[in-house]
Image (tube, rainbow, N blue to C red):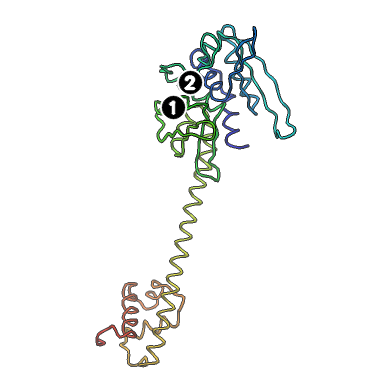
Amino acid sequence: MSLTRELREELARLPLPVGEPALAEAAAALRFGGAWLWRGGAEGAAWTLETPVAAVVRRIRALVAGQPGARTALEARRAGGLATETRYRLRVEGVEALAALGLTDANGAPLEAAPAGGPVDEAVREGALRGALLAAGSLAGVGREPHLEVRAPSEATAGQLAALLRELGVAGVGVGAHGQGWRVVVKSGEAIGAVLARSGAHATFLAFDDGRLRRQLRGEATRAANADRANLGRSVAASARQIAVIEGLLREVGSENLPEDLRDVALARLANPDASLGELAGLLGTAKATVYRRLSRLVDLAEGEAGPWP
């Protein structure tokens, strides 16, 4: 199951809120994931919400059921043709109910965004956030960069959700146009965790955080391995250069003409071409820095950059 599906399934099965939080959740779900429908005649306006998660439409229907004048209907569209999964549609009717949800005006005409003022109670804010995630949220994080996105039908709606997230203490919220609509984006793993916790999706948070930590550990292991390979490559190149220099120097002046300390380190390097400086230091019973200085001295001698031998 994808994280997006897991998120929606978990939120849809949380205990139903009551009062204003219930109204805020239902309104946000219908606004972010639904569409206004004019049926004409006496039937008038309706609002529809379509989703592949049956538990979502059942939850929103239960939240709307208590509104005066609300009429709801559910239908399923089986997979077939280009559709790869069953889709579930909720239709909400009733001018009074739609106006109470802030989706239409008193005449049934759609409103571009929620009425001014917005939720002030924290539980109401969390309800609105939960509704937006239920209907239009998508989450990625296992094997990918952390990414939480909520599609929004208008710039005003996207701005309202971004403001709500900031009021809930979520940092790094972005808003931008996307195709024919808008989206609210959170990319920080810590901020996404705060969104999931605020909405009540604790199991999804654990799955998301586990995937994020695994990806972080893999990245750190890869960087460490790359650093080790780079260090090994430099060590091999330095050793090869030292051996070539030492061999040329010995052919030119002979080992008996080298100072004893330089001769010892030269012969140790020739006998142990793959040894590190630390390993050479252990063989010679001296410090690693001393080995490095003596090898550098040999290179300088071979290249004519050193002064007289001690």
Quadrant in the picture for the N terminus: top right
In the rendered structure, the answer to whether residue 302 lies left or right of residue 208 reads: left
Q: Which residue is mark 1?
A: 159
- Ranked by sequence position, the earlier of labels 2 and 1 is 2
Count the marks: 2
| SS label for mark 1 | helix
Measured along the vertical axis of the image, is residue 119 above or below residue 246?
above
Q: Secondary structure at mark 2?
A: loop
Where's residue 242, x and y in %? 40, 80
Three-letter amino acid code at disc 1? Gly
Q: Quick check: marks 2 and 1 in contact, CB under 8 Å?
A: yes
Q: Amino acid at mark 2?
A: Ala
Q: Residue at x 52, y 21 (%)?
A: 28
Q: CA–CA distance between discs 2 and 1?
A: 10 Å
Q: Nearer the viewer, residue 301 or 46?
A: 46
Residue on which disc 2 sits: 113
Residue at x 43%, y 66% (from the top left corner): 231
Q: Work out whether residue 123 or residue 56 is closer to the camera in this orientation and state it.
A: 56
Q: Name the quarter where the C terminus is drawn.
A: bottom left
Choose between 204 and 125: the one closer to the eye. Answer: 125
Query: 178 above or below 270?
Result: above
- Give x and y (percent) for residue 255: 37, 91
